[in-house]
Amino acid sequence: MNTNKILVVDDEEDLCEILQFNLETEGYEVDVCYSAEEALQLNLKQYDLLLLDVMMGEISGFKMARMLRDNPETASIPIVFLTARDTENDLLTGFNLGADDYISKPFSIREVLVRVKAVVRRSANKSEIVDEKPIRFDELQLFPAAKKVLLEGQEIAFTKKEFEILKLLLENRNRVFSREEILTRVWSDEVIVLDRTVDVNMTRLRKKIGKYGKNIVTRLGYGYTFEE
């Protein structure tokens, strides 16, 4: 069963009732509002997804979405627009406001359920990446899921191979890896790679991680290690 909480905001009461019934049947917890003004009175941080109609009274769905995106507390809530307007300009406006999806009316309930499930899943995956604990050495941080490296809080651009080498060394500090081991682990999908390729990547890697480059030590005749 789903435990995600959804808010449906639409001035068509019959449509809200249908959406609420079907979403609750799928296991979601669902609240309904018939205007943006009513919705904005709620604690919106509690919701995992907003289904938001575009064409509503004084505060349109687009205007409400802009208000949410401008507020740090609600900026990351996934939004799916529901609208009878499906022009290219409307689509661009919706996505420029950070919409996660855009469903044109009339729609089938099955379509809505599939799209909601996909957005909720993507949002959950993003949260896991944001919340992941990095592999850390002092002010050098490597995030395996997000595939990024921070040096003193600044993100550093790495190639895939450089990232994998650093990950291998940071996860196994003080262990010496031969060139052959590094090639096997990092270039496992390549047919022929020269040992010299490891040396070249190590040189670039040391340069990119600044003062921590000295922690990548060469053991002559053996290979490389990250020393604490």
Image (cartoon, helix red, strand yellow):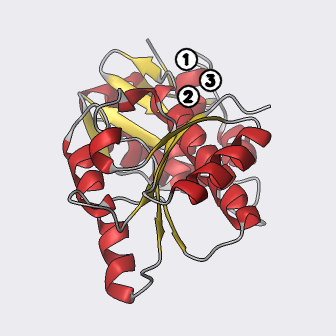
Residue for point 56% across, 32% down: 128
- The part of the image, by quadrant, that contains residue 221 is top right
**Mark in the foreground, 1 or 3:** 1
The alpha-carbon separation of the residues under discs 1 and 3 comes to 8 Å
Task: In the rendered view, tell whether residue 140 sits above or below residue 161.
Answer: above
Give the percent coordinates (x, y) of residue 185.
Answer: 72, 43
Please rate how many residues cluster around mark 3, counting C-alpha atoms within 10 Å: few if below 14, some from 14 to 19, many from 20: some
Q: Is residue 224 visible?
A: no
Q: Which residue appears at 57% of the width and 52% of the height?
A: 16
Q: Position of residue 167 (x, y in %)?
A: 55, 33
Which residue position is annotated with label 1? 173
Q: Is residue 186 left or right of residue 16?
A: right
Q: Would you say the residues marked 1 and 2 are in contact, meaning their CB atoms lie under 8 Å apart?
A: yes
* Element assignment for label 3: loop
Tell me the element at label 2.
Answer: helix
Which residue was labeled with disc 2?
169
Residue behind mark 3: 176
In the picture shown, does residue 26 fall above or below 81? above
Q: Is residue 2 left or right of residue 155?
A: right
Q: CA distance from mark 1 to mark 2?
A: 6 Å
Q: Residue at x 52, y 54 (%)?
A: 13
Which amino acid type is marked by label 3?
Val
- Is residue 16 shown above or below 112? above
Amino acid type, residue under disc 1 in the picture:
Arg
- Horizontal and vertical percent for residue 62? 29, 62
Tell me the number on the disc at residue 80.
none
Residue ID at (23%, 27%): 152
Q: CA distance from mark 2 to mark 3?
A: 9 Å
